[in-house]
Image: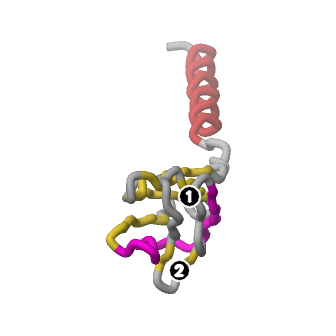
């Protein structure tokens, strides 16, 4: 191998190394954009009955039932009465599980899970 060939190989290895380093430094991943989730109240139940959201997401409860309902989590939130055809929204920030009921019909139960990450 000649000196010129050796220098060319070293230069190529150096360039490849720099390219690999530049490729491995990825741009920071932006946080996910807040989403809006809908819970439909119909047939005397919440649908979905188990909902997982991210902090900053908003949940909208839409009452498509014939009766007034609430979305009430003990110590967490209370929609007060949502009349037929009405809705109520809440933006959730704190991770955790929030089981809730309809205060007017306590057999109606559901849960919102606020989770960070994917």
Q: Secondary structure at mark 2?
A: loop
- Residue at left offset 65%, top offset 53%: 34
- Residue at left offset 57%, top offset 33%: 20
- Residue at left offset 60%, top offset 35%: 23
The residue pinned by badge 2 equals: 76
Which segment did they paint magenta?
A: 86-106
Residue 32 placed where, x, y %? 62, 50
Q: Quadrant of residue 46?
A: bottom left
The residue pinned by badge 1 equals: 61
Residue 64 placed where, x, y %? 52, 50
Tell which circle, 1 or 2, labels the residue nearer the N-terminal end.
1
| In this view, 38 is above or below 21 | below
Q: Main secondary structure of the magenta part?
A: strand
Residue 66 placed where, x, y %? 49, 55
Q: Nearer the viewer, mark 1 or mark 2?
A: 1
Residue 116 appears in the rendering: yes
Q: Quadrant of residue 9?
A: top right
Give left or right: position of 29 versus 53: right
Q: Residues within 10 Å of mark 1 (few under 14, many from 20)?
A: many
Q: Residues within 10 Å of mark 2 (few under 14, many from 20)?
A: few
Residue 62 placed where, x, y %? 56, 54
Q: Nearer the viewer, residue 51 or 54?
A: 51
């Amino acid at each position: 191998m000649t000196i010129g060939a050796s220098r060319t190989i070293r230069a190529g290895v150096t360039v490849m190394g720099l390219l690999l380093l530049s490729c491995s430094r990825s741009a920071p991943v932006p946080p996910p954009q807040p989403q809006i989730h809908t819970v439909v109240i119909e047939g005397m139940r919440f649908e979905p009955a188990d909902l997982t959201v991210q902090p900053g997401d908003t949940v909208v409860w839409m009452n498509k039932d014939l009766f007034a309902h609430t979305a009430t989590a003990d110590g967490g939130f209370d929609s007060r009465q949502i009349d037929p055809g009405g809705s109520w929204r809440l933006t959730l920030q704190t991770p955790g599980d929030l089981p809730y009921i309809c205060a007017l019909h306590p057999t109606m139960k559901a849960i919102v899970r606020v989770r960070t990450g994917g």
